[in-house]
Image (cartoon, rainbow, N blue to C red):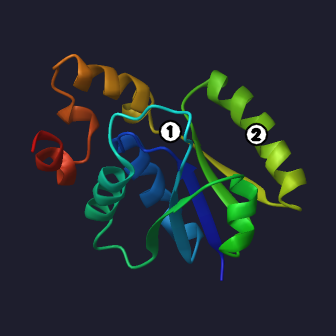
Amino acid sequence: MKIAVFPGSFDPITVGHVDLVKRALPLFDKIVIAIGINASKKYLYSLEERMAHLEAVFVDYDNVEVDTYEGLTAHYCTKVKSRYLLRGLRNASDFDYEKTISQLNNIVGDGIETMFLIAQPEVSHISSTIVREIIKGGGDASPFLPKEIWGMLNS
């Protein structure tokens, strides 16, 4: 079974994340969206909220699983028997950063491969960081968020 892990903080999940997962589904038997837990990072949404957001968005996808992990992503991949990481690239800066991480994961994870998908032009400008700032500033972030979670964010 080909399993891919899509790691991230998903604080919040964006339409860019959703697009990436949907485009990658034909390539894998299962995609595990794995929320990395970093105790030193300050999040806008709690772990429970982020899990609920992801589960709401992918409720109808039997081949998508939502999970959490601590520690190294490569070690988590070993735990869930995944040989693949899924990552999106929006621009050259993403590539430079992700290339280094993928090479380290390949060494630490004993051959784990990182599969890169280039962001579609209509979502290539969206990042969780920018969306968080819009939300914190009281702006309308709905164009950047999956419709399944709009009500969850305003409640």
The x and y percentages for residue 143 are 21, 33
Provide the secondary structure element on which disc 1 rests: loop
Q: Nearer the viewer, residue 78 or 57?
A: 78
Q: Amino acid at mark 1?
A: Ala
Neighbourhood count class around disc 2 (C-alpha, 10 Å): few under 14, some 14–19, many 20 upward: few
Residue 43 vs 64, above or below: the answer is above
Q: Is residue 127 visible?
A: no
The x and y percentages for residue 142 are 18, 35
The x and y percentages for residue 73 are 69, 54
Neighbourhood count class around disc 1 (C-alpha, 10 Å): few under 14, some 14–19, many 20 upward: some
Provide the secondary structure element on which disc 2 rests: helix
* Numbered badge on residue 62: none
Q: Is residue 74 left or right of residue 59?
A: right
Residue identified by numbered label 1: 119
Residue identified by numbered label 2: 101
| Cα distance between the residues tagged 1 and 2 | 18 Å
Residue 6 vs 45, above or below: the answer is below
Residue shown at 34% from the left, 34% from the top: 44
Q: Nearer the viewer, residue 6 or 137?
A: 137
The x and y percentages for residue 38 are 56, 42
Q: Nearer the viewer, mark 1 or mark 2?
A: 2
Residue shown at 16% from the left, 20% from the top: 138
Residue 78 vs 13, above or below: the answer is below
